[in-house]
Amino acid sequence: MTERTWLITGVSSGFGRHLTEQLLERGDRVVGTIRRPESVDDLTSRHPDLFRAEVLDVRDTPALRAAVTRIVADFGRIDVAVSNAGYGLFGAAEELTDEQIDDMIATNLTGSIQFIRAVLPHMRAAGGGRIVQLSTYGGQVAFPGNSMYHATKWGIEGFVESVAQEVAPFGIGMTLVEPGGARTEFRYRGAQIAEPIPEYDATPAHNFRKMLDPAAGLAPGDPARMAARIIESVDAEPAPLRLMLGSQALESTLAVLRKRVADFEAQTDLATSTDFPPETD
């Protein structure tokens, strides 16, 4: 097994934490970004030769670029970069504040874009590498009460799908990871909830409250198993563009995509009616 150097954002909890623990146990080097150094003191003490913590806010683009440059200088290269930092924001669109919207875009979308942009020149110079972007099946499927979260994930999916085609000639593979519901802090303790407007109480916009309540049933996804599948995907050639994790997520996504295709096919006549008529001469 080849020892790799991984750069992972947001390793204090959730998928970032599971990925880091599994990688360190198998002997890979991990540079993990966090906002609070004490959140990974145990990892630093258990794996002083393999783990390094970097205090970083992905919303700070100059600091992000400086950190990536410093890591490459110290370790020679970054073999795998995992863009994982992000959070959930729930509530009807009308309930969200301007500040909540701006911060979510800055973290989940712009932060991920700038992280990838910071890593690419170094991987290109090294002759290849792998970039893993944590998305969600909510990058394909949309639910009420999740509008801004979906907006950032649908946005990063389009960005990655385009960039993957740009950098393939340089030996850089990119993968979008689309997990379903998993038993992580992200789902039960890490999400932000907008101040409710009473008019939405009896509407689907507040269905998310049941999803966030453990008493209503735990999420089916095992984050440790999901992390293992993500790590395994890095050895796949070519890199899978998408990695769907969770049977519930797969079923929901397939149902939505089938309906979307059927809806488009039903508009065949409408779509073709807007073209210039075929040349007759």
Image: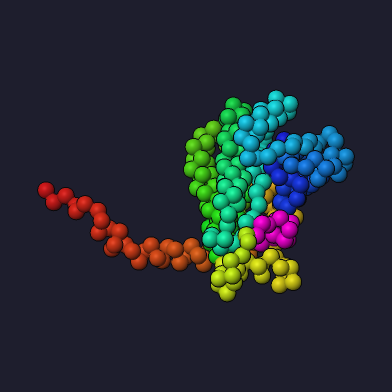
Q: Is residue 192 magenta?
A: yes
In this rendering, does residue 204 appear at all? no
Left or right of 38: which side holds 152? left
| x, y percent for residue 84 | 66, 46
| x, y percent for residue 86 | 65, 49
Which residue is located at x 25 percent, y 59 percent?
273
Which residue is located at x 66 percent, y 43 percent?
82
In this rendering, does residue 80 appear at all? yes
Whether 2 is drawn above or below 219: the answer is above
Which residue is located at x 53 percent, y 53 percent?
151
Left or right of 144: which side holds 12? right
Region of the chain picked out in magenta, as a range: 181-193
Task: List the single residue furthest toward the bottom.
Answer: 202
- The N terminus, quarter of image: top right
Q: Is residue 65 magenta?
A: no
Front one among 186 and 80: 186
